[in-house]
Image: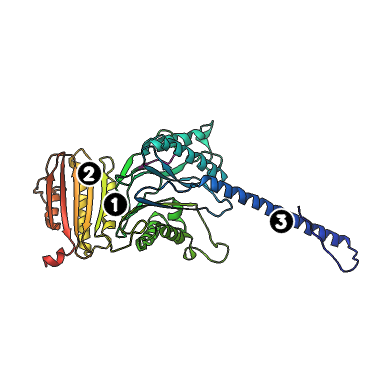
Amino acid sequence: MGAWMAGFAHPVAFTPDERSVLTTVARMLAQALERASVAESERELSLGLQRSMMPTLGPEIPGMTVAARYVPTGGGLQVGGDWYDMIPLPNGRIALVIGDVQGHDVRAAGLMGQLRIALRAYASEGHRPDAVLSRASRFLHGLHDFPGADTYDPGDHAGPRFATCLYIEADPTTGCSTSRAGHPEPAVRLSDGTVLVRPTAGGLPLGIVPDTDYPTTRLVLEPGETIMICTDGLIETGGHDLDTGWARLRQIMEEHTGDSLEKLADALVAAVHGPASHYTTGPLVDRREDDIALLLLCREGDGCGPGSPAGPHAPVRRTALSVAQTEPERIAAARQQLRDLLHDWADAEQLDSAVLMVSEMVTNVLVHTDGDALLVAEATGEPGARRLRVEVADSSDELPHKRRPGEMASSGRGLILMEMLADTWGVDPRGEGKCIWFELYEDGASQGD
């Protein structure tokens, strides 16, 4: 309750107009008190929701370090549709989950809580990542299984909603198994600071189709490497798209000294909500366009983990990528992976040659065999004197041979290109299939001259 009193030093007689003004002021004060009371109640509700819905990180993963951040939009509620979770699994491994339910209102927060609990339940039963997401999609779709759900108005906030999700089953010794449901792909910071966005197979967002397949991608995390997963709020806030947003985050991750994963998490959030990322005065101060959830997982080694010095940059960079027969569009991802791996290669013409040979090698596997192509690229040595080795393996036993294409032929020049552009190359038969490889030396141009 509230009271307002006006005191006077001497007797005062009020006119009808003065009485009306005083009554109006009293009503305005009452409304202000009511609004303050409602705002305080909403704040307490929001903080309670956040405490109950946002988990704490634990238990510890032997040989790995984890850091997480959650930033709501700031629109009143302190919890929205984004979430992260860390789930102990029956096999002794740990599952890391991050997701984003469509919307920023109370209903999005409620669906997020239900979906997080469902994912935790399915994971605790011991299912593989693809099975966990398939069951979660069926669960979310079932929440909207009512008459007329297939004809809802997209502008109706009570209609069906979807959610994106990324699920990682982490093992310190064997690596990470990843399944993705319409979510941004993970990024990996190599031990020398190079950042690669890892192409990861995925399916539809959760809740759109009840029976959806979610392929699993295997990621190997070397000692000292850090994997980052986040919601789109960290990438696209501030008018950025996926490309420019990743470029902003890549710069922060590459400048990180590797001494503390918590400092890296703070720096990534500050890049979006820091003083330089938005207006500091006026109506747009501290504008927050979307919720942000962020998870960092580092395999302890040089430059990562308690007591690990930043030290000199590791001389080895490695990336691997599979290209399936049904996904020829991933050849473009293979080219981009190589360019990101060699972002500081001294000779731009050598880099173009490497990209051309990779494109040729992977395309030949898809055209001339019935299997998938496995690309492994590794750069070793100190900058300025590195060796690049690229291998493309397939399951066919038929070895390639050099052809003599005519002037108008549209194919048959693959091995000729390898002879002309690579410092050395070859074909190695394996137990099942073969591997064609080439090497480039960063100082090869000067040696050739």
User: Of helix, strand and loop, which one carries label 3?
Assistant: helix
The dot on residue 373 is 2
Q: Tell me the quarter of the picture where residue 259 sits.
A: bottom left
Residue 204 lies in the magenta-colored region: yes
Whether the magenta-drawn stretch holds residue 264 is answered as no
**Residue found 53% across the figure and 31% down from its top:** 146
Give the mark toward the camera: 3 or 1: 1
Start-end of magenta stretch: 202-206
Q: Within the image, what quadrant is residue 128 found in? A: top left
Secondary structure mostly taken by the magenta-highlighted segment of the chain: loop
Report which residue position mark 3 lands on.
32
> Please, what is the three-letter code of the amino acid marked with disc 1?
Glu
The residue drawn where x is 45% and y is 59% is 266
What whole-number distance in Å separates the C-alpha atoms at marks 1 and 2? 22 Å
From the image, state whether disc 1 or disc 2 is nearer to you.
1
Q: Residue 203: x percent and y percent?
A: 38, 40
Mark 1 secondary-structure assignment: loop
Circle nearer the viewer, 3 or 2: 3
- Name the residue nearer the viewer: 332 or 41: 41
The percent coordinates of residue 426 (x first, y second) are: 12, 50
What residue is shown at x 22% (from left), y 52% (from top)? Answer: 377
Amino acid type at mark 2 = Ala
- The answer to which of marks 3 and 1 sits earlier in the sequence is 3
